[in-house]
Image (cartoon, helix red, strand yellow):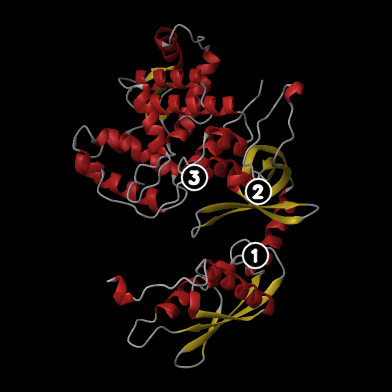
Amino acid sequence: MAKESFDKEIQFLRMLSLTSGAYNRQQYAKRLGISVHTFDKTQRKLRDIRQSLTNQRTDSELGSEMTDLVRFQYGESAEPLLLFLFRAKSMKETEVERLSVILHTLQDSALTAMELLDACCADLPEELALPDEKTIRSDLKYLEEVGVIRKEPGGRPYRYSLQQDVLTRLTPEEQLELYDFVDMMANTQVPSVQGYLLRDSMKKVIKASYPQEEATEPYIYKYHYYSRILDEAHLYTLLGAIRQRRRVQFQYFSPKKPSSYSSQNTNPKFEREAGGSSNRIIPIEVVYDHQYGRWYVIGYQSRRRFVKFRMEGITQLEELQPIEEEHMLALKKEWADIRRYSWLVDTGRTVTVQARFFHPGDGQRNFILDRVRLQGQWGIITPETDHSFLYEIQVNGTTEIKPWLRSFGSSCEILAPRKLREEMIEEWKEIAAYYEPVREDVQLPDHDETE
């Protein structure tokens, strides 16, 4: 028997979204480090979650939806395909049923914990275990903390009611305006999951006044990284650990490794070597790379000092014991001094990068200079001639700045350091080789002939 966490479902959906369903079952299972049987079981579980969050449909319809779920299409990111995972994240079936009964019962009036206990005992399915008073009070405390319900004024026994003034006190027009704002922010800002959940709840309320679909679909969002939503599963745990000065430990799967997950086996007869590396860090900072849609966590290890991990490779994340406040403040100060010259999260040796940029042709807007001014961070721009300008910057290594420089193509020439210049030359030679004809005697037709 394997004791699995929710990491398997996260890595499963990430692979499906990045490959658009291009692999077969065996290839997916091998990449995930699980058996084909576990792969099928995980897919069935996700389909069940999907079915519970939508209208009841047939198996064939649900099968086609899973295929569409992983196919990226521009203009269809307003309904994030991975969001449904978070609605069932870490929720047991008994919790889902119990919380649903509590919220449904509070629709009409404010009730006490004992009255809600009676409602749960009466309305829960027969196959589920009945809750006790301690469980109900724990549920009420959780719902109050996340802002779903509120405690009414007055003495004991306390009465609880739904916290929905933001919707009930607004006119339909105001609700629609608020929905448009939440929709825009959730699709363009990070983090986004909480915004999507609020957006989805508001849509259900708005449809009572605006039954037509067009009312809640005013925008089309073309630029979107789906996988960033999945990494937010770890985001709040890490932010909480930073605030509470707690160490964390996790299994890490580097993007360069052939596998992205490994099952947690508890049966000695079926033990297999874990594909990831075990890490324990003091988390210092969380960084989001908007250019590639990646989350990073910066941490401290006594042996390697400051280290960085891409959050997409983190599994089995656990919080550990806290550290002293003085120690945490000292680490944050030291990291702040180091990151001054990090293009993003580079922690290498500081080097000076020099590049020459060439202006576009006469009569064109100087978009090269505009872009370097906008994206060049703390680099210094020096005019050189009527056709070029120099750019100089100090960075902690060249790994992260290299893709940015390469994206300018022939409009950028690397001058220093020499090693970076030679690396860029070799990369451009490799790219040029891709466009050479396979046979030397192949002649491309003239433009006139093609017409």
Q: State if disc 1 and disc 2 touch (CB < 8 Å).
A: no
Residue 209 location, x and y as percent?
19, 35
Is 253 drawn above or below residue 36 in the view shown?
A: below
In the rendered image, the quadrant that contains the N terminus is top right
Residue at x-position 77% and y-position 55%: 304
Q: Amino acid at mark 3?
A: Thr
Lower sequence index among marks 3 and 1: 3
Q: Residue furthest front?
A: 441
Under circle 1, the secondary element is helix
Lower sequence index among marks 2 and 3: 3
Q: Which mark is residue 254?
A: 2
Q: State if disc 1 and disc 3 touch (CB < 8 Å).
A: no
**Of the pair 225 and 414, the residue shown nearer to us:** 414
Q: Which mark is residue 19?
A: 3
Q: Which residue is mark 1?
A: 339
How far, Cα to Cα, is label 2 from label 3?
18 Å
Under circle 3, the secondary element is helix
Is residue 222 in view?
yes
Within-10-Å neighbours for mark 1: few <14, some 14–19, many 20+: some
Q: Amino acid at mark 2?
A: Ser
Is 447 drawn above or below residue 18 in the view shown?
A: below
- Asked where in the image residue 313 lies, by quadrant, the reply is top right
Q: Nearer the viewer, mark 2 or mark 1?
A: 2
- Asked where in the image residue 274 lies, by quadrant, the reply is top right
Q: Amino acid at mark 1?
A: Arg
Lower sequence index among marks 2 and 1: 2
